[in-house]
Image (spheres, rainbow, N blue to C red):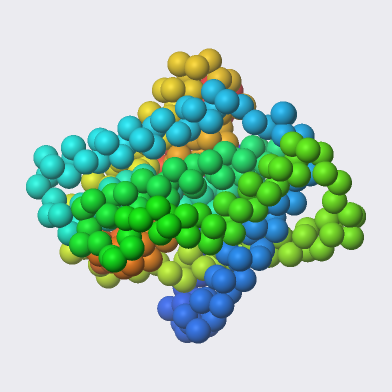
Amino acid sequence: MHVINTIVPIFAIIFLGWALRSKKYLPSSLTEPLNRIVFYLALPAMIFEKVAGARFQAHFNVPLLIGTLIPLIAVFLLGIGAAHVLGISRHHTGTFLQSSFHGNLGYVALAVAFYFLGTEGFTTASILAGFLMLLQNFLSVFALEKFGSGTEDGGSPWFFLKKILGNPVILSAVLGILFSVFEIPIPQILVRSLKILSDMALPSALLIIGARLSLDLIKSQYRLVIGAGFLKLLVLPGFGLLLYQWFGIPPTQFMPGLILLAAPTATVTYIMAGEMGGSTSLASAAVSANTLLSSLTFIFWLSLFTQVR
């Protein structure tokens, strides 16, 4: 029941966001500034507060990190092969690839980690997410540059560096890790301020995800959406699970990584597709479909965890 009691409320809030948008209670004129507040302030505050206040040695696990990063590279290569076999056009290939491995870590995966695993699991997931986001962004830029129509600076190292330096979620995780490693004390007044700000992060993020669901494009892109969803929601976490077991990592330790790998396609794939000559319609369809389907696949992966732990 713990799995159901975790996943159902999370996706209930996501569907509430969709319903509020449908009834025009949550229009884009509201979700856009709310998204900026969550992305640039609330979520980074939550990640920094949890990671900086934790013992880094107790949460950082090298085999777990390796077992989380390798599946991403493997699915990226598998996606290239799948695109060739399926005869996917060049215009759609870059977006298909990033839809198959670029997960929504900040808004969905960390919410699941927090509500299912608690503060300790959330902290481990946040540390892992910092490394995973770096690799996701690098592979996404590479995929869109190689297979998209491209932009003038799309393939330059500076373009990738801007993606990283401009991502407050990555920066907050890195800064939190530094504070944790060097045991830098944080004034209590700042801790409480961060806690107040971070309390709005996950509920607001889930409402935003729901408000951005777009179901109209799924039907026209169903073949590519199914392929990307199969790789993202089943193959990627499945490969990660096999590696965790091969490395001898117990379920209580690998679950934060598995949750990150099982996350649905990130909404930023739409933005990156638009910037770098990919297919925005496919990105939008993949984000919406995989977000909905992940309500079922998360139940599957979390239920599997409760059986083996």
**Quadrant of the image occupied by residue 239:** top left
- Image location of residue 10, percent across then percent down: 56, 55
Question: Would residue 293 appear left or right of 201 to someone viewing this image?
Answer: left
Instruction: In this rendered view, identify the residue nearer to me: 12 or 112.
Output: 112
Q: Exactly how many numbered labels are in the figure?
A: 0
Q: The N terminus appears in which quarter of the rendering?
A: top right
Give the position of the C terminus as an image quadrant: top right
Residue 287 at x, y percent in the picture: 36, 58
x 18%, y 37%: residue: 81
Would you place residue 241 above or below residue 232 in this image? above
- Is residue 164 in sight in this rendering? yes
Nearer the observer, 74 or 215: 74
**Residue in front for this viewpoint, 140 or 95:** 140
Residue in the image at 23% along x and 46% along y: 227
For residue 302, above or below residue 8:
above
- Relative side of 57 to 106, left or right: right
- In front of the other: 248 or 171: 171
The residue shown at (32%, 36%) is: 75
Residue 25 pos. (x, y %) = 52, 82
Q: Quadrant of residue 107?
A: bottom right
Residue at the right extreme, as displayed: 188
| Residue 303, x across and y down, in percent | 50, 34
Q: What residue is drawn where x is 63% and y is 48%?
A: 173
Res 115 visible = no
